[in-house]
Image (cartoon, helix red, strand yellow):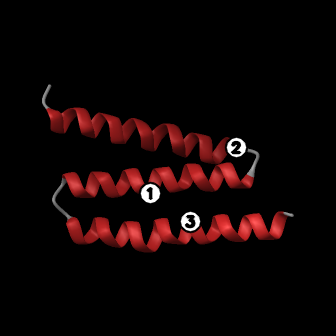
Amino acid sequence: MNANQLMFILFAAMIVVCSILAVTSRRILRAAVYLLFVLVSTSGLYFMLNYQFLAAIQLTLYAGGIVVLIIFSILLTH
């Protein structure tokens, strides 16, 4: 097993576990953080496939949007 296969297994396991946790979590802040981990892991897979532009768009748009969601969830739930 080489390093690429190990990184793929790590990213895939992180995506599966964090997506299940994001759906089943009862707290909105934890669900948003799990979703952030899913999107960062997805961009890691894009980097592995040498799709640097798509990975950068994934990080800036989607993961940046989750950070905004976290900020709004903190502000609106208090």
For label 3, the crowd category at 10 Å Cα-Cα, with few meaning under 14, some 14 to 19 and many 20 or more, is many
- Tag 2: amino acid: Ser
Task: Answer whether labels 3 and 1 touch (C-beta < 8 Å).
Answer: yes
- Please provide percent x and percent y for residue 32: 62, 56
Numbered circle sitting on residue 66: 3
* Residue designated by label 1: 39
Q: CA distance from mark 3 to mark 1?
A: 9 Å
Quadrant housing the C terminus: bottom right
Residue with the mark numbered 2 = 25
| Mark closest to the chain's N terminus, 3 or 2 | 2
Residue 41: x, y in percent? 38, 50
Seen at 65% across and 51% down, the residue is 31
On residue 4, the disc is none
Q: Amino acid at mark 1?
A: Leu
Q: Residue extending furthest right? A: 78
Q: Earlier in the sequence, mark 1 or mark 2?
A: 2
Answer with left or right where residue 21 lies relative to residue 73.
left
Sequence order check: which comes first, mark 3 or mark 1?
1
> How far apart are labels 1 and 2 at the CA level?
17 Å
Q: Determine the secondary structure under disc 3.
A: helix
Q: Residue furthest left?
A: 2
